[in-house]
Structures are given as C-alpha cells and as structure tokens.
Image (cartoon, rainbow, N blue to C red):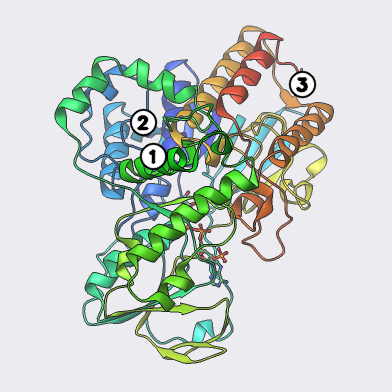
C-alpha cells in the first residue's frame, strides 16, 4: 500500500462496485485508493451474514462480466448463491486481480470537501488521514445503512440484539433460545425458517405481510453451467434486454388478454420455476392494478394452501400490489408457520409499544424472549451517501441539497458536486435491476468519462442543474406510470420516519443504458466541463 497523499480517485467502499471500479481505473493507468469501513472486502455480502442470506438473482447472472477468464473459471454451486459463496467470490476477485494493495480496510470516509481553487477533493477518513483526489467515486451501495427502529425501552433489553444487515462474524447459536424477529421483508423471510429450526421458540413480529414466491433453489447442474459458459455473452445480452437487467423471461403478453385458465397456467409455471421471474409472467403486472390483482390473488391462494392454521394464514396474506415492495423469494417461509415452536404476532393490529428488559410488549400482550433480531431493513439508496459529509461548490452539503429527496443526473452525478460520481445512485436502475451488471455499466461509463477528460486535458465535470431537473422529472414520470408509488416501500424512502417520499430507482435497464450511451455520443450532453 503506497502512502501517497494524492491520487486520481478515491473510491469509497470495497463491495461489488468498489472492486470493479478499482480494477478498471488501474487498468487505464489512473491511481486510485479504496477506503472500506469493514475489516474485509465484500460490502453488502460482508455485512449481511444472517442465516439464510442469499441472493435473489441467479448466480450465473449475479456476477461480473469484465473478465471472461473470471466468468469461465468461477464455478457457482447453487442456482442462487448463498452469502458465504458470494463473499468467497469477491475475495477471489480481490486476490486474482491483485486489488488489495490499494484497499484500506477498517477505515470509513468521514468527509470529502471540494476545493474550488484546485478542482480537487480533500477526503478525510475517520482516523484523521487526509488525501486529495481529483475524483471521488461513491461505491457505498444501496442497502448499507441499517435501520433499527427506535422503539421505547430498546436499550433496556438484557439479551443480545442483532440486525440482519450488521450480523456478527462469529456464528450465532440460537439453540434453546426464545428468539424474536421483527420485520418480514427479504431478510426476515430468509432468516426465519433457519432460526426456527434452532430456536426453542421463535416469535415473528409482522407489520406488513409480504408477497413471497418460492426460490426453488437447487444445486447447479454442472452441465447447465457449462452450457451457459459456452456462450456466456448470450445470457448477458438476454438479461440486458429485460426490464430489470436479468433474464425474467418477460413477455409482451398482458394478463387480461388471456383466459383465466391460461393466466393460471402461466402463474403455476412461474411458481414452479421459482424466483423473481414470477413478475415477468405478464407485461402489465406492475402497470395495471387489475392485472396485478390476478397475480396477488394467486399468491394468496398458495399461502392459504401452505399454512395449516387458517387464522395464521389470514395474517400472512399480503394485501396490495405484488412487486410494489420488492417481491421476496423464499425457501420454506410460509411452511415455517406450521411449526409448533413458531408464533406470528400481527403488530399492525396491536403495535409494539416497548422493548422491556426481557421481551417485547405490544398493545395486546408481552412476549418474553432471550434475543431480538431486527430484520428492519435499511435507509436505502441515500443513507450511505448522506452520512458522509460531502461538500461541493460553495461548501454546500449533499445531505442539505437532498433534504427534500435525492436529485441527480442519471443517478451518476449531482449538480454542484463536480468530479463526484455515484455508482448505482438514486435516479439509476440500481435496486430495480440486477445490481452487478448495473454496477459494471456505471463503472465502465465513469472510466470512459475519465479517459475522455484526460484526452482533452479537462479538469472538471459536473451535471448541469437543467439536465438534473429534467432527469428527476423523467424518473418520476416513468415511476408514476407504474404501480410502484402506490405503497410504502423503501424504494420511496417510506420505511424511514421523516424521509421525504421520492421514488428513487429508475425503472427500465435497457432504456437507461441507451440514454447513458446517447449522452456520451453527444459529448456528455447535460454535463458541464472545464
Ligand atoms: P425491508 O425489505 O425494508 O424489510 C424490513 C421489514 O421490517 C419490513 O417487514 C418492515 O415492515 C419491517 N419494519 C421496518 N421498520 C419497522 C418497525 N419500526 N416496526 C416493525 N417492523 C418494521 O428490508 P430487508 O432487509 O428485508 O430487505 C432489504 C432488501 O435487501 C431487499 O429488498 C433485497 O433487495 C435485499 P413494513 O413493510 O415497513 O411495514
């Protein structure tokens, strides 16, 4: 690790985005340093170590494509990779491409201040180190700032309190313990079946019942993997043409144009195949309330069939729009409520009032537990950006600029913050897409931009306020034509009390990529350079 006090780029975060960005910049002859708060690389996959943590996009697609050797060499063992396997993969990438020498672990970037006289960023870490950089690239991830609800009495609890998004590194043994899980989003739904197998008793506190489809995870057949590898580009291209950037087998057929029997057959087929491609069943599922209701009712029927106790099934039935909150993909989630050692508590009906020294008290009862697991999600998309003191032109803080909601051009830059790039920032497909290809698309775009600037001896690039305003309006317009704004999802910031309600991701990976390419073809239209 060089002690250089000045680099071309500081990259914040060593997850999928930071590792790939470092590789790209280095291969183009830029100097870069990565700061990573964790004690290892991996980002999301470093922190989310809870039992059952697994990706909901298939391994063969949730992986890098920047190196054909890498994608040929690496053997995935399951259809959906588990957290330990993805973390092994990312560690392998760090070693294979000799990335570690430019990564500083256990170091959080506290602040980055843009110096207008020199067009350089002054970056300060939490250990007081200062480094200057021409560019700062935020590779901080969309789901990295955890949300633990501030329930009265929380600090009085005498047992361990864990968060799925910041799980201990030592194995956690729930054997013989009475465990509470608060939250039934993707993380809770993955963890609950495994915790139930260990705990003496598991009490699940559910505020909103969620839609979930079976993952139908299985070991990957080596022949299937070989077939993909023979023509990997075909799979990547197919994924890139789909709305979410992975192969959801999306069709042009709409749900209401087919007969009831045909529709049902399609849902049955997707259910049997498993996973998020359920949403690809029909073109209008997330656009038309009536179409969506057919999918919602299908899932409710399945839940009624899976859960033996009708009263419990009733509480587990999700209302509202399928896919509006991220669809979950599970392994034995609903069946877990058939176990004698699992209790479901409906905290929509009787809210949690307090955490007591020995349990959780709702408006209806008190539940004695030894351990509380919060599966309560993240301050998504903006939390990891606004917790760094980022100050652009005129000393303006990003967190002040974004007080009413994030504003960016293409999700890549925010006006008034020259030379500051965000990988998969709000306003880009990010969490509404397969993250890894979205990350690589941003990494490639940023690296090409830096090259372009170098070739023209340009020092500074920033989004123009007009381009930003137009983009923010467009992101909203696209979202408003869908059912996404109709529920209280983290896509809208609605899971964080007080967070402004703004739809953050951009829907439509192919259209987005086309727009980014067009901007470049028009000499970085919408950006001002100097
Ligand atoms: P999510 O999807 O945000 O789920 C959080 C869950 O926690 C959800 O059921 C929430 O209920 C619940 N929650 C949040 N705050 C509270 C409070 N104060 N009281 C009770 N329950 C609460 O986070 P995940 O970690 O599961 O998943 C995040 C993403 O990671 C996921 O979509 C994948 O992309 C990977 P609510 O629905 O808000 O009523």
Q: Callout 1: 10 Å neighbours few (<14), some, many (20+)?
A: many
What mark, if any, has residue 156 been given in the picture? none
Can residue 18 be seen in the rendering of this structure?
no
| Circle 3/circle 1 CB separation < 8 Å | no
Q: Secondary structure at mark 2?
A: loop
Image label count:
3
In depth, the one of 379 and 414 nearer the eye is 379
Q: What residue sits right under mark 2 in the picture?
A: 61
Judging depth in this view, the residue of 282 and 451 nearest the camera is 282
Which residue does the numbered mark 3 point to in the structure image? 526
- Residue 211 vertical placement versus 115 (above, below): below
Circles 1, 2 touching at the beta carbon (< 8 Å)? yes
Earlier-in-chain disc, 2 versus 3 = 2
Instruction: Select label 3 or label 1 by which is in front.
Output: 1
- Residue at the location (47% across, 72% down)? 314
The answer to whether 459 appears left or right of 108 in the picture is right
Q: Which residue is mark 1?
A: 57
At mark 3, the secondary structure is loop
Count residues near mark 2 (Cα–Cα under 10 Å), then give few for <14, some for 14-19, many for 20+: many
Q: Is mark 1 within 8 Å of ligand 1?
A: no
């Amino acid at each position: 690790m060089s002690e250089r006090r000045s680099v071309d780029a500081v990259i914040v975060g060593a997850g999928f985005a930071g590792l790939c960005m470092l590789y790209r910049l280095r291969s183009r002859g830029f100097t870069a340093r990565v700061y990573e708060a964790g004690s290892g690389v991996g980002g999301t996959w470093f922190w989310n170590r809870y039992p059952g943590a697994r990706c909901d996009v298939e391994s063969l697609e949730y992986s890098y494509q920047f190196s054909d050797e890498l994608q040929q060499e690496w053997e995935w063992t399951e259809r959906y990779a588990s957290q330990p396997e993805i973390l092994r993969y990312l560690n392998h990438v760090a070693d294979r491409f000799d990335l570690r020498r430019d990564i500083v672990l256990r170091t959080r970037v506290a602040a980055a201040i843009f110096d207008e006289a020199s067009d350089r960023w002054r970056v300060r870490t939490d250990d007081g180190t200062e480094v200057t950089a021409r560019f700062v690239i935020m590779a901080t991830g969309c789901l990295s700032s955890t949300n633990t609800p501030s329930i009265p009495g929380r600090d009085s609890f005498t047992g361990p309190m864990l968060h799925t998004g910041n799980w201990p590194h030592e194995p956690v043994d729930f054997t013989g313990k009475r465990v509470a899980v608060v939250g039934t989003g993707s993380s809770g739904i993955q963890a609950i079946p495994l915790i139930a197998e260990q705990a003496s008793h598991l009490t699940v506190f559910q505020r909103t019942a969620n839609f979930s489809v079976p993952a139908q995870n299985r070991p990957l057949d080596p022949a299937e993997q070989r077939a993909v590898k023979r023509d990997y580009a075909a799979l990547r291209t197919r994924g890139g043409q789909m709305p979410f950037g992975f192969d959801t087998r999306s069709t042009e057929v709409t749900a209401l144009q087919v007969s009831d029997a045909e529709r049902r057959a399609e849902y049955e087929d997707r259910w049997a195949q498993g996973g998020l491609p359920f949403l690809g069943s029909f073109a209008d599922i997330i656009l038309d309330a009536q179409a969506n209701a057919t999918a919602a009712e299908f899932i409710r029927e399945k839940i009624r069939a899976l859960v033996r106790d009708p009263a419990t099934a009733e509480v587990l039935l999700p209302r509202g729009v399928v896919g509006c909150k991220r669809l979950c993909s599970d392994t034995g989630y609903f069946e877990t409520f058939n176990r004698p050692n699992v209790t479901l508590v409906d905290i929509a009906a009787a809210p949690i009032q307090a955490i007591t020294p020995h349990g959780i008290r709702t408006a209806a009862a008190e539940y004695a537990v030894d351990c509380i697991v919060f599966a309560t999600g993240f301050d998504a998309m903006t939390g990891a950006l606004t917790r760094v003191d980022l100050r652009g032109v005129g000393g303006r803080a990003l967190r002040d600029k974004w007080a009413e909601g994030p504003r960016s051009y293409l999700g890549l830059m925010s006006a008034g913050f020259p030379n500051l790039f965000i990988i998969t920032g709000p306003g880009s497909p990010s969490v509404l897409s397969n993250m890894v290809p979205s990350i690589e698309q941003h990494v490639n775009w940023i690296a090409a931009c830096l090259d372009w600037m170098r070739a023209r001896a340009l020092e500074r690039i920033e989004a123009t306020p007009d381009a930003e305003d137009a983009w923010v309006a467009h992101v909203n317009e696209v979202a408003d034509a869908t059912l996404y704004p109709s529920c209280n999802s983290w896509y809208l910031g609605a899971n964080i009390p007080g967070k402004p309600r703004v739809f953050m991701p951009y829907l439509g990976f192919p259209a987005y990529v086309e727009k980014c390419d067009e901007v470049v073809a028009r000499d970085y239209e919408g950006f001002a350079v100097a």
